[in-house]
Image (tube, coloured by chain):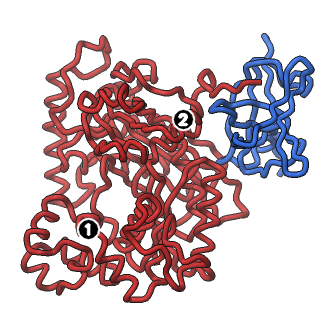
Amino acid sequence: MVQRVDLMAELIKHPQASYLLRIRGESMRDAGIFDGDVVLVDRAITPRSGHVVIAVVENEFVCKTLQLRAGRIKLKAANPTYPDIVPKDSQTVEIWGVVVAAIKQFNA
Amino acid sequence: MFALVDGNNFYVSAERVFRPDLNGRPVVVLSNNDGCAIARSNEAKALGIKMGDPWFQIKHLEDEAGLVALSANFALYGDMSDRMMSLVAGLGHRQEIYSIDESFVDLTGIRGDMIRRSRLIRQRVLQWTGIPTCIGIGPTKTLAKLANHIAKTAERKLGIYPEQFNGHGQDGSIAQICHLGLLSEADRRTLFERTEVTEVWGVGPRIGKQLKDSGIATVQDLVRLDPVTVARRWSVVLERTVRELQGTPCIDLDHEPPAKQQIACTRSFGRPVTEQAELAQAITEFASRTAEKLRRHKQQASQILTFVRTSPFRRQDQQYSRSMVWPLVRPTQDTAVLVNAALEALKAIYRPGFNYAKAGVMLMDLVQEGFAQGELDWGEPSLPNDQNTKNRSRVMGAMDSLNTRYGRGTVKLASGGTEHARLNPTGMPASRWKMRQERRTPGYTTNWQELAVVKG
């Protein structure tokens, strides 16, 4: 049987691990994630270098591109006016989840 | 074998998923109307805060110890519970949801390394939902529950139990996961000797004191007793407990001790159910049974959770699982109100085209009868007035005695009848909820306007 495309099923691969969070700020603009967008986050995906992730830095959620090089973590902004985050040795960074989609709503 | 899986300090853990700043801090979640502590983080426990402590008595710890108090966010807990439960279901073939954060899983027919399997499930729940869990396994539900207590205690308080046990997984640790069936009799005795009798499922404070007064202080003291003597000297209920501790399963669904702070009724269907009408019938029955229990315990509920889900074991099926917490206008024990709320929730979460395998109803945020404060007129024309409420509770009382006398279901509500649809005493959106909830966190997973914010 042919069924209408199911947007939820297409986007959400792990329902129990999927969460929506709202972006505030422009640091990921060049990755296509703008202020006010809602991102779909999948915690079931193991984060890899190059993934856009939600990380917890100093008890705050931040959205950045994860870069893993020689065992060192860097959280890269996708906007030249924003600094990357390079955790110090004493700092722990938790990767909360992997961003799999961004939702933009237009005034219509 | 049974497993009992539960979320550690569940309400606090659910809050911490979206509030990383709460990690490492003492946190309590307050009941209905910000009355008393119904969940505590380990740090709050370390401050000496007890379950049920009234807020005004511990408020000073806000300034003195950095205590954070939150109003209960049942919509969040319901959603996180749903995620956790449907993952835990993968541990075995049959799952019985015992409360919002605990479920029994029947491990019959599951082969292989149970410690490894449990660890994988635990790890998955932690990664996917952020909720830490403990798993207890034993040949009876009472032993599984006890094993769960031991697993939790071993993790939280070092030094109470030995750290390693032969034959118990790779590292021999019983923290987080404890499987009594893998331990030698001597090792089990060691654990039982170091666990207080009041930690046994179904041994309440009253009977616990009686036991202690007769020199039965530890689980080991209780296990050693002769069940027949126990029945004669105490009760048939305690006899069943002793038999279960000795390894003979004898507590069925109807004789389970009630969960603290909640009343649940959930069932797996014998065959897949697809129609909303059929689910509504089941939900009506579940809500009615929880309402009966509520009245038996002289309590009232302020929130009702309804859930439906497909079976994770029918891999060919498309999976769906959803729950909804419905806040009630005021604490109630009225079957009609509770059934109505549960059916409204069902209407909201039901999706056609799925093979439903399980459904349930849970009452939460319970208060003692008569504890509910008199409130102002809510200006709700469709609400029954006080006289009505009084009459209704007499109807409920009559219903219970008829059902007790002539069997469950003798008298029941005709669900979906027009009368109830008109009455609609509960159809309150959350915004009408006027209880004091000054410290409630947003509906992170249940409200598009209240999603957690990320610095981009």
Indicate whether B236 appears above or below B130: below
- Residue A92 location, quadrant: top right
Marks 2 and 1, how far apart at CA: 45 Å
Q: Which mark, residue B348?
A: 2
Q: A96 or B423: which is nearer to us?
A: A96
Q: Secondary structure at mark 1?
A: loop
Q: Residue furthest front?
A: A89
Same subunit: marks 2 and 1: yes
Indicate whether B107 appears above or below B318: below
The percent coordinates of residue B140 (x first, y second) are: 38, 77
* Residue under the point 12% across and 63% down: B209
Q: Looking at the image, can residue B333 be seen?
A: no
Give the amino acid at mark 2: Ala
The percent coordinates of residue B6 (x first, y second) are: 46, 57
The percent coordinates of residue B17 (x first, y second) are: 58, 40
Chain painted in blue in the figure: A
* Residue under the point 85% across and 51% down: A71
* Nearest to viewer (mark 2 / mark 1): 1
Q: Is residue B246 left or right of residue B231?
A: right
Chain B, hue in figure: red
User: What residue did someone put label 1 on?
Assistant: B196
Give the amino acid at mark 1: Glu
Q: Looking at the image, can residue B139 be seen?
A: yes
